Amino acid sequence: MDQPSIAARKSLKRKLEHDSLEGRDDRKFRAAEAEAEPDTTGQDLALEIQAHVDILNSTFSSLEADRAAAKRASHFLSQLAKNEEIVNLIVDCGAVPALVMHLMAPPPLRGESTPKQYEHEVEKESAFALGLIAVKPEHQQLIVDAGALSHLVDLLRRHKSSSNSRAINGVIRRAADAITNLAHENNVIKTCVRIEGGIPPLVELLEFVDVKVQRAAAGALRTLAFKNDENKNQIVQCNALPTLILMLQSEDPTVHCEAVGVIGNLVHSSPNIKKEVLLAGALQPVIGLLSCSESQREAALLLGQFAAADSDCKVHIVQRGAVRPLIDMLESPDAQIKEMSAFALGRLAQEMHNQAGIAHSGGIVPLLKLLESKNGSLQHNAAFALYGLADNEDNVAELVKVGGFQKLQDGEFIVQATKDCVDKTLKRLEEKVHGQVLNHLLYLMRVAEKSVQGQIALALAHLCAPDDRKAIFLDNNGLELLLGLLESGNQMQQHAGAAALYKLAAKTTSVSLLDAAPLSPTPQVYLGEQFVNNPTLSDVTFLVEGKRFYAHRICLLASSDAFRAMFDGGYRERDAKDVEIPNIRWDVFELMMRFIYTGSVDVDIEVAQDLLRAADQYLLEGLKLLCEYTIAQDISVENVSLMYELSEGFNARSLMEACILFIFEQFDKLSSKPWCSHLIQHILPEVRDYFTKALTKPIQANLKQV
């Protein structure tokens, strides 16, 4: 058995005059008329409790003096039991069996014909005390084992043998409350109440003339029905539904709050009872309760349960006016009300026309706002509702327009189930961004406010199909919108713009320097490794750092335009036997020549920049790519600005693109750097040029993308 929280246990001891029924805690207790609590403190308390227990044990008779003494003693214990810290002491003093005994009327005196003294009063105080003791779950079974249930059930029937009076009403109400507390979260005791015959009189009491008795009976049935199928079935078989549905329409909020709680527990995980409740006419009264602050949470939960029954019911709930109040409830200050309304809307949103209706009635924005909640259940119900709404193409543009994509993508979700639901929603949006939906978004991107245009461009960068990217970002100005966000002074917009551009690059870049080494250049004339710096058949010698490097003109002529110009043009190197190389180190020159002779070379990061300079000087594009790839592996937040300058200096386009992609990918970290804004402004022309070229050429197949 689950142990109730401290807060839940305290709520069971509310005073009788406090008639409002808050929350879904079935274990509520309406405490006694306001009276001063016994002046008993310190070490004498146990002795005084024991003395009152002894009085109860010795006064079970119809004598007036005994009845008066028993009433005082039971009242003393009931008032004392309001203090939960004293309850264990009361039990330890043997109060439970004494109180159970006084749940019965004592045998009448011989020849007695006048009304009994304090009739029903002692029983009422005893039931009240036992109900308070039952707040602590460890005492529930003790009370039942003492025989309390049969006596409490008998008290429920007292209205049949006596005329209506305040005393009878009080004892019946206390008996119903005691049963509520005894059975709270204790399925064994719930079953015992049914076996003792407690359900039929409780159902009868739903029609009792006293409203407080009606409410107490409903509270007991609510507890007995919770997760106990046999009890549910008997409550329905006793014909409780018609009366409960009438109670839903009571002008007293405390009455319809209890009634909707009973019905909610009856239909929970019980499809057959759910159908009977709907056939009995509960739907419209429950919808009516959405406007009552005391009952709207229970009503929303119940509508969510109804909506799971069949698609017709989903439609009927909407047709009967539930959507507008449910959406209004999404902005309630009460988290539980928001959660239940989101739950109901999520169920309703499983039907196509409901999806459009909920969105049209303004449901999208408050549901998106709930994604920011720190309450995991509330967040999940909102996410599930949005997942349903995203299934309808009519809603996609509205979701994107109000920034829904960003909230779904960037949200911090507490439980894994919510993360999975959001991922499915994003996937659903991606599947629908084509045809009429895409045309609608493009129209809005042309005519809507600038902020809305930006939201749409951001979303489309992530959601669009590759084949649509040119139409969106060049033909309809989407690229300029993203670049505008990057230039804005708003850091959140800059971050979103950078992320969108990075995603767009993934759809447009054929090969990533960061993920795969470039392909080797088209084979020319490779003499092979054995001819590197080999005097055999050498017809030209290079002087590098005072050392000779033997080379072969045929290999050099085939390698680049620079060498062809050197040896075929009017330069002095054409006929020179020795060619001096003044600005390249020996190890760098040797690597360059090794590439020329073999078509490949391992480029170490230590020499990559010097080798890039040499490759650029001698127009060796294949070697440049290898160097750019190696250098790109070393890009970091600290050096990306210098790397970009390096790419500009040597026209290293691949390295430049790698720097641009890195800036977009790591923008969160870069944005805090003082030089970041200057760097962004500096790269914008190249970014624009990069995307313009990439978006106008088809994606190459079979090449690894970013």
Image (cartoon, rainbow, N blue to C red):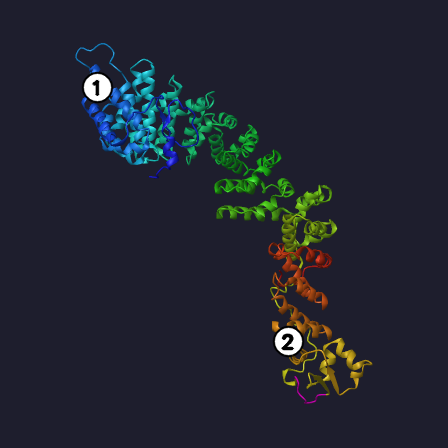
Q: Amino acid at mark 2?
A: Ser
* Disc marking residue 600: 2
Instruction: Tell me the mark number nearer the camera, choosing from 1 and 2.
Output: 1
Of 24 and 484, the residue lying toward us: 484
Q: Secondary structure at mark 1?
A: loop
Q: Is residue 546 positioned above or below 562 on the image?
A: below
Q: Is residue 63 left or right of residue 688?
A: left
Q: Earlier in the sequence, mark 1 or mark 2?
A: 1
Crowding near the residue tagged with mark 1, few <14, some 14–19, many ≥20 C-alpha atoms within 10 Å: some
Of 451 and 202, the residue lying toward us: 451
Q: Is residue 25 left or right of residue 323?
A: left
Q: Is residue 50 positioned above or below 162 on the image?
A: below
Image quarter of the N terminus: top left
Q: Secondary structure at mark 2?
A: loop
Specify whether residue 536 is painted magenta: yes
Q: Residue furthest left?
A: 110
Q: Is residue 409 positioned above or below 662 on the image?
A: above
Residue at the disc numbered 1: 106
Q: Position of residue 484 (x, y in %)?
A: 71, 50
* Any part of residue 190 in sight: no
Q: Residue at x 26, y 26 (%)?
A: 150
Q: Residue at x 60, y 36 (%)?
A: 359
Total numbered circles: 2
Crowding near the residue tagged with mark 2, few <14, some 14–19, many ≥20 C-alpha atoms within 10 Å: some
Q: Is residue 186 positioned above or below 550 on the image?
A: above
Q: Which stretch is magenta?
A: 532-538
Q: Position of residue 93 (x, y in %)?
A: 22, 31
Quadrant in the rendering for residue 510: bottom right
